[in-house]
Amino acid sequence: MSSLWPAGPRRVLVVGIDGVRLDLLPELHTPHLDSVAAAGFLAPVEVDEATPTMSGPCWATIATGVTVAKHGVFGNHFGGNRLDVFPDFTTRLAAVHRRRTFAVGGWEPLFLARQGGPLFAAPGRLAYIAPLADTPEDWEVCDERATAEAVAVLTGDDDPQASFVYLGAVDETAHFLGCGEEYRRSIETADARLGRLLAALRARPGYAEEAWTVIVVTDHGHVDQGGHGGRSALERTAWVAACGPGLLPGGEVLPVRHVDVAAHVYAALEIVPDPHWTLDGRPFTPASAAAPATSS
């Protein structure tokens, strides 16, 4: 078996926070998400008409860089998927490019062979941390443990070049309690966990010589009473925040889609996708880099 690819300076951290409404972010104390946006951008994402506003299909699109028509995940049961043909970025990078990769979280079909999963099939290192029950309180504990595991890996000897950290408590809180005060507090708690992950990057001995791309993404929104799956603006509006090489601080970017996340992961690692991957996304592109319109 071939050895792992020598680690260059490029690294990527993707943090997925499930079910965070874009319209509420300006009201909340989220200094760490704000810092990512200030160093790069925060942009809305509209879940396309073919994609149910559900976690399964949205996370599959985010992780694979292709639409539901290709990856075949149409609900929260992943049965009938084509993830063997269109794998997630941690699996593809590990298998094809021999990069060290890591994924952690607590939602079964993302990480285990259950409910038709897993989405993250074969990263170099995987940690599944089960909530004791599907309650907001137990999911907060789960996310806390997932964050601690990620901090340990990011500051340890594994040195992953691409990582995915899933936080699910915000979504669970909305389902149980709606989008009120508890939901808002859960978003702020998730932001504090993001802060710990960012601090872990800065604590790395080689951080000064590394070039980190950080992507924070949500999959869908929620109606006020909690819940999603419909086509209302609140449900189909998601968002992406990112910073790193090639992204201008506070700069506008061309419209962003979920399929662009995986495409940008590859670009951030200076990997040119094989045309046979048939990715549907493109790397995040500053608006200033767009080709000017030519006059006829």
Image (cartoon, rainbow, N blue to C red):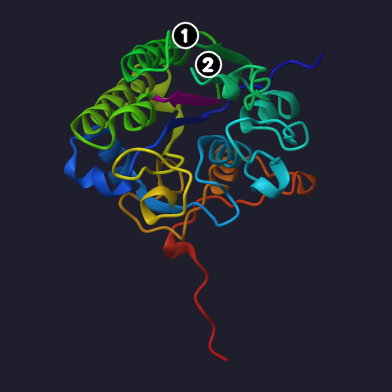
Q: Is residue 253 left or right of residue 60?
A: left
Q: Is residue 54 left or right of residue 122?
A: left
- What is the number of the mark on residue 159? 2
| In magenta stretch: residue 97 | no
- What is the number of the mark on residue 156? 1
Q: Is residue 270 left or right of residue 41?
A: right
Location of residue 211 in the rendering, given as x and y in whole percent from the top left corner: 46, 33
Viewer can see residue 249: yes
Q: Residue at x 59, y 52 (%)?
A: 282
Q: Quadrant of residue 200?
A: top left
Viewer can see residue 101: no
Q: Amino acid at mark 2?
A: Asp
Span highlighted in magenta in the image:
162-168
- Measured in 3D between alpha carbons, the distance from the residue under mark 2 to the one under mark 1, in whole angstroms, is 7 Å
Q: Residue at x 62, y 25 (%)?
A: 120
Location of residue 148 in the rendering, given as x and y in whole percent from the top left corner: 38, 11
